[in-house]
Amino acid sequence: MLRGNDLISVRDLEKADIEQLLKRAEDMDRTLGAGRTLDILKEKIVATLFFEPSTRTKMSFQTAAKRLGAQILNFTSMESSSMKKGETLADTLRMVDGYADLLIMRHAAEGAARYAAEVCKHPLINAGDGGNQHPTQTLLDLFTIRKMKGKIQGLSVYLVGDLKYARTMRSLLYGLGMFGAEITLVAPAGLEMDPKMVEEVKEKFGTSVTQKTALNLSGADVAYVCRVQKERFADPYEAEKVQKSFRITMDALKGVKDDLAILHPLPKIDEMDPQIDATKYARYFEQAKLGVPMRMAIIAEIMGE
Amino acid sequence: MGELVVEKIENGTVIDHIPAGAGLKVLNLLGIGDGTKVALLMNVPSKRVGKKDIVKISGRQLDEKEVNKIAIIAPNATLNIIRNSSVVEKSEVRLPKLLAGVSKCPNPKCVTNSEKAETKFAQEAKGRFRCSYCEMLFEAKELLV
Ligand SMILES: [Zn+2]
């Protein structure tokens, strides 16, 4: 299904496509777990274009491509390129498209990935376009949840934090909705999820979505936490205040389910007490690691290997 | 008060059933400043909608983009094409499934506002439109820039 296509948005994916990717990611995970790598992309060149810095996501993609045997072509930041001199995004893309077999792009403009895919002949993967989409993150999140819990349907998943500005949360809400999770949104006042997004998921998938403002995780199987996007606040003190009032402390973990899994897209800053890292609930480093087999699955499926 | 008399047009287009007060907007979006003869009738009593505006444009028909723009402002408007002083074609405007190149994306961070990309908005439930690029959802009337 994904073969030869781009991966731009979770909205483009059918449940069957995601099922296929989850299955493929399991295979990849087993391969990596056995200490093996693959060479199915031995002859291929994968280009990463990160117009906005994101060391973690870029490393995850590059690791995935290398584990499949591909060569990496890395287009580095704006300063070292001609973008500053006013080269259009389209021109840069056409050039890289001439060198590589697959392009992986992050860009600050919303919709940049869709636009880039129209410009390029080779397939393109969206590694984040401004506040809009980050589909590979959602896919790795679904993979993580299913691997840890054995299922997604009927699970009680709490999305906690700045739900207004975090694109991760919007895409994940959609993915969880599609797979029938019972979703609870917990956000500080003023940082609630876009009501149109909630409405879309409820109407499209018939999902139950509950909204809360109090930080109480007692019913959750999974708590997915994200930071307050301080850069989106006009007043940094206001951002600081909101973050402090919404910090997950050790106290917040009293009375939670024994097998609660706390996930986080990382990097985390001060939205969680660092002591939580040492508890059995903290599963975010495993989650980050699972990004590699999922991204291997995505690249392999797109390249038709 | 007597009947308001407006000269009939021989050839052209009459846009009827524009919501009262929106007629000027319709004129503006058509950008008629090129000497085309137009008539704007405001607050005309109407059985169907109470009061309405009517725009008459002489010697000109509308293209698809213009009709789509009118559909955003005046979703219930009707178009009458006049030839030799009689109506030869009557149609209702309809918001299309896809609005292409009709409006700017209201999201300032949308790539269509920084790169040379033609905007596309796909119709979803409740007559809302989603930008095919930034994926933001808008009410049709928000697309008037
Ligand atoms: Zn847009």
Image (cartoon, grey):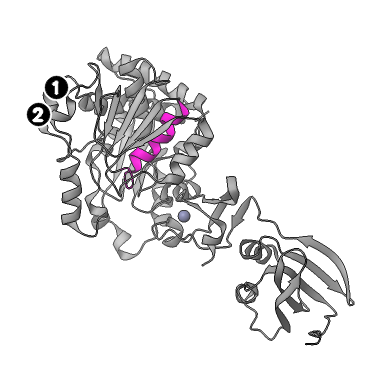
Residue, disc 2: A275
The Cα atoms of the two marked residues, 1 and 2, are separated by 7 Å
Q: Going 36% across and 14% down the picture, which residue do you hit?
A: A150
Q: Secondary structure at mark 1?
A: loop
| The C terminus of chain A, quarter of image | top left
Q: Is mark 2 within 8 Å of ligand 1?
A: no
Q: Is residue A303 visible?
A: no
Percent of width and height locating residue A207: 47, 30
Residue A297 place in picture, x, y as percent: 39, 25
Residue type at mark 2 is: Gln
Amino acid type shown at disc 1: Thr
Q: Nearer the viewer, residue A134 or B116?
A: A134
Kindly check if marks 1 and 2 are in contact, taking CB atoms under 8 A apart as contact: yes
Q: Can residue A211 be seen in the rendering of this structure? A: yes
Task: Give, as a single range, the part of the protein colored magenta.
Answer: A163-179
**Residue named by callout 1:** A279
